[in-house]
Image: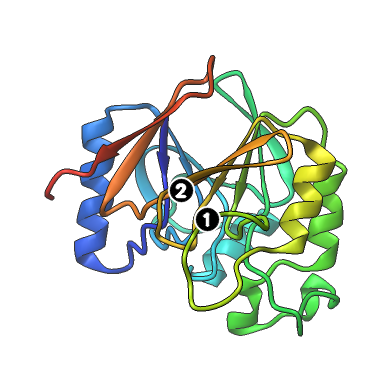
Amino acid sequence: MLVLGDAHANDSARRRALFAAIRDADEEVLLQAGDLFYYDLPVETYFIAGNNEDFDVIDALRYGRLESSAVHNVTLIASEVVEVEGLRVAGLSGNYAPTQYEKPRDALYEQRRRHFVEEDVERAKELEDVDVFLAHEVPHGTPVHEEYAVGCTAIDEILEALEPDLCLAGHHHQHTESTFGSTRVVTLAPAWESYYLLDPETLEVTRHETPSA
């Protein structure tokens, strides 16, 4: 199956790159790790929300209130498990903000809806038999390079609780491979640079260059 990192596909050039990756991969199912920002796709897509999305669409998907012809073939994963080609795939939608974390979700407004809250994390920690976990933050020890300290305690706690075989993470626009406990962690380059193929039987992840749109 196809795996993509951040797409930021509200931008027309990056939307063309998104579709170029989908065409080149020629897969029927897509897992996407947040910052998708375009929701009318030609293949069945399972994604988590990132910190750059249309949050009216995200809320409509989250609460089952979607009424839009511009949203097609997308399923939001928000602290739940979905079955995808024989794999149990879970995910945590959003990113971390210390000032918002302890609030109830319905207290988040406008752009603050981009964050996950403690109740989202606690619900995710109760999931069972997860093969692949999607995150828009990374656990501590992930070798991405930023101007700030990288690593999110909430993701640490989820991976410790679930022990998935594989964690796929977006947000940082960098490809890295590492481990957290027993979990293999792959951070994903953005969709306009790379796409990935995931073998559902072996969980092998291979990286490919996104062709010119």
Q: Nearer the viewer, residue 109 or 129?
A: 129
Residue labelled with disc 1: 143
Q: Amino acid at mark 1?
A: Pro
Q: Residues within 10 Å of mark 1 (few under 14, many from 20)?
A: some
Q: Residue at x 52, y 55 (%)?
A: 143
Which percent across, then down, holds residue 69? 41, 54
Question: Is 154 placed left or right of 131 in the picture?
Answer: right
Q: Residue furthest top?
A: 201
- Quarter where residue 168 is shown: top right
Q: Amino acid at mark 2?
A: Thr
Vertical arrangement, residue 23 with respect to residue 152, above or below: above
Question: Is 203 placed left or right of 116 in the picture?
Answer: left
Marks 2 and 1 in Cβ contact (< 8 Å): yes
Marked residue nearer the N-terminal end (2 or 1): 1
- Quarter where residue 16 is shown: bottom left
Which percent across, then down, holds residue 30? 43, 37
Vertical arrangement, residue 83 with respect to residue 67, above or below: above
Which percent across, then down, holds residue 76? 59, 49
Q: Residue at x 61, y 60 (%)?
A: 137
- Quarter where residue 106 is shown: bottom right
For residue 169, the mark is none
Q: Residue at x 26, y 42 (%)?
A: 21
Question: Is 60 placed left or right of 117 in the picture?
Answer: left
Scheme of image coloration = rainbow
Helix, strand or loop at label 1? It is loop
Which percent across, then down, holds residue 213? 13, 50
Helix, strand or loop at label 2? It is strand
Q: Residue at x 54, y 70 (%)?
A: 51
Vertical arrangement, residue 17 with respect to residue 85, above or below: below
* Cα distance between the residues tagged 2 and 1: 7 Å
Residue labelled with disc 2: 176
